[in-house]
Image (cartoon, grey):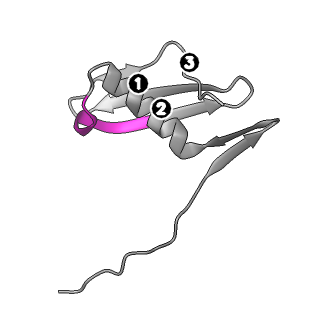
Amino acid sequence: MIKKKESSMKTKIEVQFQERNIDVKDTEKLVKENLKAAGVKMNTIANLDIYYQPEEGDIYYVATTKDGKELSNEEALKIEE
């Protein structure tokens, strides 16, 4: 059996627009918290697409469950700065 060596490298992706710096991981965390608050279990999600609109700081998402249901937010989420 061959063991894979785990990388110690950490990656941070940030979107910079005008006076804002938004960490991509923070947007994902916010979306997942929103889905959990709506009673969605993360292990039922097959696909999660997140859209960030930097002009307004709006975050939208479309989540597809393993049984084919689509879930999305109508009202934009925002990361508090």
Q: Are marks 2 and 1 in contact (CB under 8 Å)?
A: yes
Classify 10 Å Cα crowding around label 3: few (below 14), some (14-19), many (20 and above).
few
Tell which tag, 3 or 1, sits nearer the viewer.
1
Q: Secondary structure at mark 3?
A: loop
Whole-percent x, y for residue 47 in the image: 36, 38
N-term-proximal mark, 3 vs 1: 1
Whole-percent x, y for residue 67 in the image: 20, 29
Q: Which residue is mark 1?
A: 34
Q: Which residue is mark 2?
A: 30
Whole-percent x, y for residue 57 in the image: 67, 26
- How far is the residue under mark 2 from the one under mark 3? 11 Å
Classify 10 Å Cα crowding around label 1: few (below 14), some (14-19), many (20 and above).
some
Q: Which residue is mark 3?
A: 76
Tell which tag, 2 or 3, sits nearer the viewer.
2
Q: Which residues are magenta?
A: 41-49
Q: Residue furthest top?
A: 74
**Along the horizontal axis of the image, is 54 left or right of 45?**
right
Question: Mark 2 belongs to which amino acid?
Answer: Leu
Q: Which of these two is toward me, 76 or 47?
A: 76
Q: Residue placed at 23% from the left, 39% from the top?
A: 43
